[in-house]
Every structure is written in C-alpha cells, then in structure tokens.
Image (cartoon, rainbow, N blue to C red):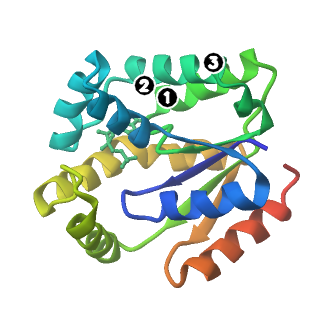
Amino acid sequence: MNIVIFGAPGSGKGTQSEKLIEKYGLYHISTGDLLRKEIKAGSELGKIADGYISKGQLLPDSLIIDMLAKLLDTTPETRQGVIFDGFPRTIPQAEALEALLRDRGLELSAVVGLEVDEPELIDRLLKRGQVSGRSDDNLETIKKRLDVYHSQTTPLKEFYIANGKYKAIHGMGSVDSIFESITRALDGCAC
Ligand code: AMP
C-alpha cells in the first residue's frame, strides 16, 4: 500500500501518519522532515532549503523529486509500502510521483485528504509554533504557507478526484476519531 496524506499545513498529516505507520507498517517519507534534517546537517541542499522554508515558499520541483528518487532507490524498506507526507505539493510533483512509482513496479493506492477549516489550521500552527522551534510556524509565514497551499497545492485535489484515488476525510475533532475515519476509508477501498 502506497498512500499520500494530503492537506493544508496544520491539517494533521504528521500526527495521522504516525498512527498509519503503526497500523499498516508503512515507511514514512515526510519531505519537510527530510529538508529540516538537511538544514541541520548544513548540507548544500539544506542551505538552499532554508531560504525557501523560512519564507513559506515551495522548493523547486526538480530538487524535491531528485531527493525522493534517491531515497526510494537507497531505502529497501520503502518496498513495504510508503506514506508520502508533504509530497506531492504541485501537479508536476504528482505526475513525477506516478512515474517514480511506475518505474519501480509500484502504484499509488489512495490519497487521504484531511479537510480542516482555515481558522482551525492557523490556531493549530500557532500553538505548534510555541513548541516546535520551526522558522515557519509564525503568523506571517503561516499566512504565506496557506496562500501557497491554495494557489499551488489545492489543484491536486481535483487531480486525484479525477483518477479516483482521493478519499475526503473530515479532519476536525479528536485525533482518534479522525484516524478511525481514515482507516474506514482505506479498509473500504480496493488498495
Ligand atoms: P512541511 O513540514 O511539510 O510543512 O514542509 C515545510 C516546508 O518545506 C514547506 O513550506 C516547503 O518550503 C518545504 N517543502 C516540503 N515539502 C515540499 C515539497 N513537496 N515541495 C516543495 N517544498 C516542500
């Protein structure tokens, strides 16, 4: 099973990914986490990523796609199934994911779309900012990230509705009740 967990910043992708990994034994790929590791390590990619992340902008597609292709090729655990968290974020990334999987004899099973109201997203991200230490969890950058999400990432919802993979999940309420909705949607699909 290869899944994309999809939703705005603050929609709960990381939290629900942790629970999905535990239940389905999937390998977690969070592009945001990978980039933050690169920043910590002071690598070339990290230096480039830092500039984009702190401004709330997306990195160029080619950098993200190359990073992911390398990871898939050097991590045998990804063959057990992957949960993609924070990727894809643009239509070219979604097309690249199809190709990356197809070239490796794999296929995307489903896209779990966490749908959360905007005031709730801002509230959650500001709360997270008090403990995360992330350069992008402040009000100005949160607003920028939400703008970027609306302009560059929401078109993906239509893309995945059109290919029948999108599972809409009401992402408000308790972590456990949202997780239950997700597992119901996944258990009910042919994936
Ligand atoms: P996240 O942890 O998923 O919220 O990502 C934090 C930041 O990392 C984003 O605001 C982007 O600057 C960058 N980033 C993460 N994933 C991607 C991606 N798939 N494409 C472009 N930029 C990304």
The amino acid type, in three-letter code, at marker 1 is Gln
Mark 2 neighbour density, 10 Å: few (under 14) some (14–19) many (20 or more): many
For the residues labelled 3 and 1, the Cα–Cα distance comes to 20 Å
Which residue in the structure is indicated by mark 1?
Answer: 93
Disc 1 within 8 angstroms of ligand 1 (CB): yes
* Ligand 1 lies in quarter: top left
> Is 177 in front, or is 96?
177
Q: Is residue 56 above or below residue 98?
A: below
In the rendered structure, the answer to whether residue 60 lies left or right of residue 169 reads left
Residue tagged 3: 74
- The residue located at (36%, 35%) in the rendering is 37
Q: Earlier in the sequence, mark 2 or mark 3?
A: 2
Spot occupied by residue 139 in the image (x, y as percentages of width and height):
14, 63
* Label 1 environment density (alpha carbons within 10 Å; few <14, some 14–19, many ≥20): some
Front-most of residues 111 and 14:
14
In the structure shown, which secondary structural element does the residue marked by tag 3 occupy?
A: helix
Residue identified by numbered label 2: 64
Q: In the rendering, at what x and y percent does residue 69 appear?
A: 57, 19
Q: Amino acid at mark 3?
A: Thr
Q: CA distance from mark 2 to mark 3?
A: 16 Å
Q: Earlier in the sequence, mark 3 or mark 1?
A: 3
Q: Is residue 30 above or below residue 46?
A: below
- Residue 185: give its label: none
Residue at the extreme left = 140
Q: Are marks 1 and 2 in contact (CB under 8 Å)?
A: yes
Q: Determine the CA span between mark 1 and mark 2.
A: 8 Å
> Is residue 43 found left or right of 165 in the rendered image?
left
Nearer mark to the viewer, of 1 and 2: 2
Q: Nearer the viewer, mark 3 or mark 1?
A: 3
Q: Quadrant of the N terminus?
A: top right
Callouts 3 and 1 close, C-beta under 8 Å: no
Mark nearest the camera among 2 and 3 is: 3
